[in-house]
Amino acid sequence: MSSVPPPPEKRWPSDAPQIPNPYAPVQPRAPFSKAAIAGFIISCVGLFVFAMAGPLGTAISGLGFRRARERGLRGRGLAIAGMIIGAADFAFYLIARYLLHP
């Protein structure tokens, strides 16, 4: 009688790279902070309109940043960019208002 060896227990070593399941459900992403988007847009428009939109865009972007941080929303980068652009817009407005036209 011939004896057949049993099949091996492990086929692959434990340190082999694991392939992710392509049919696994996708985790939903957090929504964007609407205040962060609005503040960024107002700050960008303020650069072209060259009015007092800079402080408004900065304030709304700050609100959007805080909401994104507290509620786990996306858009913190947009909020930071909106605050920087709004502050630069306001600085350009002050320079043009008081230094170029005394």
Image (spheres, rainbow, N blue to C red):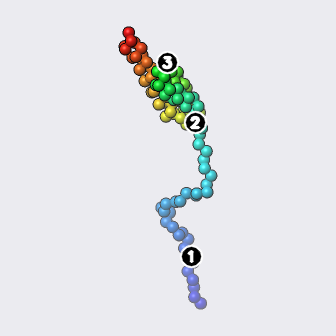
Q: Residues within 10 Å of mark 2 (few under 14, many from 20)?
A: some
Residues 71 and 3: in front is: 71
* Marks 1 and 2, the one that precedes in the sequence: 1
Indicate the amino acid at tag 2: Phe
Q: Quadrant of the N terminus?
A: bottom right
User: Which label number is shown at residue 52?
Assistant: 3
Separation of disc 3 and disc 2 at Cα? 26 Å
Would you say residue 2 is visible in this rendering?
yes
Separation of disc 1 and disc 3 at Cα? 78 Å
User: Which label number is shown at residue 32?
Assistant: 2
Residues 64 and 55: in front is: 55
**Is label 1 or label 3 in front?**
3
Q: Position of residue 49 (x, y in %)?
A: 48, 22
Q: Position of residue 22 (x, y in %)?
A: 58, 57
Q: Which residue is mark 1?
A: 7
Element at label 1: loop
**Is label 1 or label 2 in front?**
2
For residue 94, what is the image quadrant?
top left
The reply to whether discs 3 and 2 touch (Cβ–Cβ < 8 Å) is no
Q: Residues within 10 Å of mark 3 (few under 14, many from 20)?
A: some
Number of marks: 3
Q: Residue at left 58%, top 33%?
A: 33
Element at label 3: loop
For residue 6, what is the image quadrant?
bottom right
